[in-house]
Amino acid sequence: MGSQTVVADVADELARRVAAGEYQPGDLMPSVRQVAEEFDMNRATAQLTLGRLESYGFVEARRGKGFTIRDVREAGGIDVYRHLFRFSVPMPDVAIEMFHDIVDVERGIVMEALLAYTASEQTIDPAELKAAIDELERLARLEVPDYRQILALEVALVRGLLTALGLSMQRAILNSIGEMVLEVPEAIEAYFAGAADLHVLVWRALVAVWESGSGPSEAQLALFEDLFGMYHAKVVAKFEELLGGLPAAQAHAATA
């Protein structure tokens, strides 16, 4: 096993302990010597490991003291949140709470993008949109659909809408959310609580509305928002089921 792999694996284990509360904010991390002894590595590799943990935003170096554990939930930014979500998956209650937040923020950004683009002078070449949706359909119809690729392509589609609208901050947040979700297989699978084909149908329906030039009626918009909310409720319930946060029957009832 290469030294970089060792550094990554041990840093991930230490980060998991921080996420699980085994190491408390304000406490000192185990020293370089202690890390080297526990994980049977030399001190130079242990120093690199703690440096990697610092790059995650989980600890900060204090001159003469070592590395102090940060309150990652209170003080962490979006990058810290991304790592925290990944390391929280073995702790269903924490991961599910975080996923609720992720889905709520993602839904708000996507809804804003779709509605704003519908009401704007659309500047994206319809042929480009249709080509991307054709690729979505190809991926969705594979014998074993590649959910990760489909979701990454959908993020790219929304990113394009946000760029066209000049919503750069929302685009940055969406990019970070995409990174969070795409790192966690259970989160990816949760976004396909329904058939992958449904994702394709929604995008084709949106393009049809944009091409019509008339826009949807208020009743159609209200229906779309309701359906969008129901879809995201299913996504959250599926994630809870996958992590064991809900019995399968209860999770199914929550989405019925």
Image: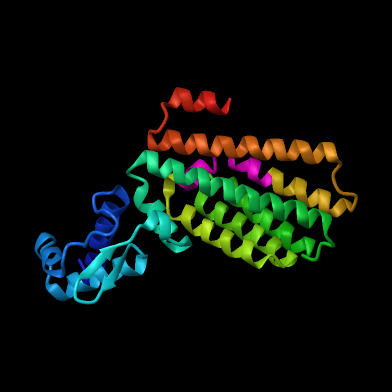
Residue stretch rendered in magenta on the structure = 187-200
Q: Is residue 35 left or right of residue 207?
A: left
* Residue 36 is one of the magenta-drawn residues: no
* Quadrant position of the N terminus in the picture: bottom left
Q: Is residue 145 visible?
A: no
Q: Is residue 72 above or below residue 33?
A: above
Depth order, front residue of 196/187? 187
Q: Main secondary structure of the magenta part?
A: helix
Give the residue drawn at x 24%, y 49%. Answer: 22
Give the residue drawn at x 77%, y 62%. Answer: 127
* Quadrant position of the C terminus in the picture: top right
Q: Is residue 220 left or right of residue 96?
A: right
Residue 146's x, y, as percent? 51, 50
Residue 208's x, y, as percent? 81, 49
Q: Is residue 34 left or right of residue 243?
A: left
Residue 51's x, y, as percent? 27, 72
Q: Is residue 154 above or below residue 166?
A: above
Q: Is residue 48 visible?
A: yes
Give the residue drawn at x 11%, y 68%. Answer: 33
